Amino acid sequence: MKLLLLFASLLVSATAVTLRTVYEFPNPTWLENVAVMRNGSLLVTVIGRPEVHIVNPTISPATASLVTSFPNANAVLGITEIAPNTFAVAVGSTTPQNTPVAGSFSLWSLDFGAGPRPNAAVKVTKITGLERMQLVNGIVALNPRTVLLADSFAGNIVRLDLFTKKYEVGLQDASLASNFSAPILPLGVNGLRVHKGYLYYSNSAQSLLGRVPVSMNGRAVGAFSVFAAGGSIMLPDDFAVVPNGDVYLTSPSADTLQYVRLDGRIETIAKGEPVSGGTVAILGKKNVLYVCTSGLEGGVPTRGGRVIEVSLSGGVGI
Ligand SMILES: *[C@@H]1O[C@H](CO)[C@@H](O)[C@H](O)[C@H]1NC(C)=O
Ligand SMILES: *[C@@H]1O[C@H](CO)[C@@H](O)[C@H](O)[C@H]1NC(C)=O
């Protein structure tokens, strides 16, 4: 019953949202991806510097500090929780033209420890090199053993076994493919999320959102299906899936936050500031959505990346 009420409030309130800037980083800071910690803090990854920062949005004013930076890289992209309070991040190098440096990617873990130890140092460990991948973008853990990684250049999804460190292309489909003739960005599969047995994905070059049912070990157990595509979701990036399976989507070049229903209907929730250059949306607690931005406008850093809080329900149903 509680869940039904939550669906209802998300649906009726889709357009009645309020937006608030929680934190703005110095210019330039391209925020690329985000994870919500169990205690409500956010871990944000950065492109342009190989950094992960922690933002505490539960206090006002919010605070932020550097968690760690990585050697031999200039970017951190996807982030996912692989065990309680332990997160995996995709680290690598990109060129000023936003193409990947071949063989530069690796996967690292950030272990914040099981208990409350606010001042303890985070344990940073390299999980494995990902030399055979090209551009590691969104990543998602299916269980403590299996992580799926989007390769936006290769246009496929790689399955990594955290126990053996073996990785191989796990999912391939035309809807995951990159397109090097595309006018703006060649990037194929970009963001990944898992919801109720489905792997959801965005494809930037093809401007689409799709999903496929997957088994616990990351194999497709049904058909790939595209539920929204075309100019109205131009160059989609990372997104949040809400309990009923619909999606809040950021599109950095269109400067939009959109609500995309599984039946393909699309509603623009916000356009322009503060969601300009939005790179990722994620659900927090209590009907709150967080959006992070790149601070880029037409590829130029015009301001520091921001963390935006989107209140979805205006208080109803919380
Ligand atoms: C959450 O945990 C991290 C790591 O222990 C800590 O740095 C941060 O301050 C905590 N946030 C909150 C809101 O308690
Ligand atoms: C790739 O992009 C070009 C240019 O927009 C387009 O004509 C072509 O159909 C695309 N190819 C695929 C496979 O989507």
Image: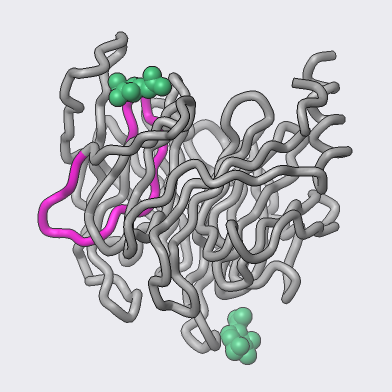
Q: Coloured how?
A: one colour
Residue 251 coordinates in the image, percent (x, y):
60, 64
Whether residue 111 is situated above or below residue 25 in the rendered picture: above
Whether residue 151 is situated above or below residue 91 in the rendered picture: below
Rendered-image quadrant of the N terminus: top right
Whether residue 214 is situated above or below residue 3 in the rendered picture: below
Tell me the quarter of the picture where residue 116 sits: top left
Report if residue 146 is visible in the image: no
Residue 155 coordinates in the image, percent (x, y):
47, 67
In the picture as drawn, the residue positioned furthest to the left comes out as 71
Is residue 82 shown in magenta? yes
Q: Residue at x 81, y 30 (%)?
A: 7
Rendered-image quadrant of the C terminus: top right
Residue segment shown in magenta: 68-87
Q: Quadrant of ligand 2?
A: bottom right
Q: Determine the main secondary structure of the stretch shown in magenta.
A: strand
In the picture as drawn, the residue positioned furthest to the front comes out as 61
With 217 as the anchor, is 273 left or right in this view? Answer: right
With 292 as the anchor, is 313 left or right in this view? Answer: right
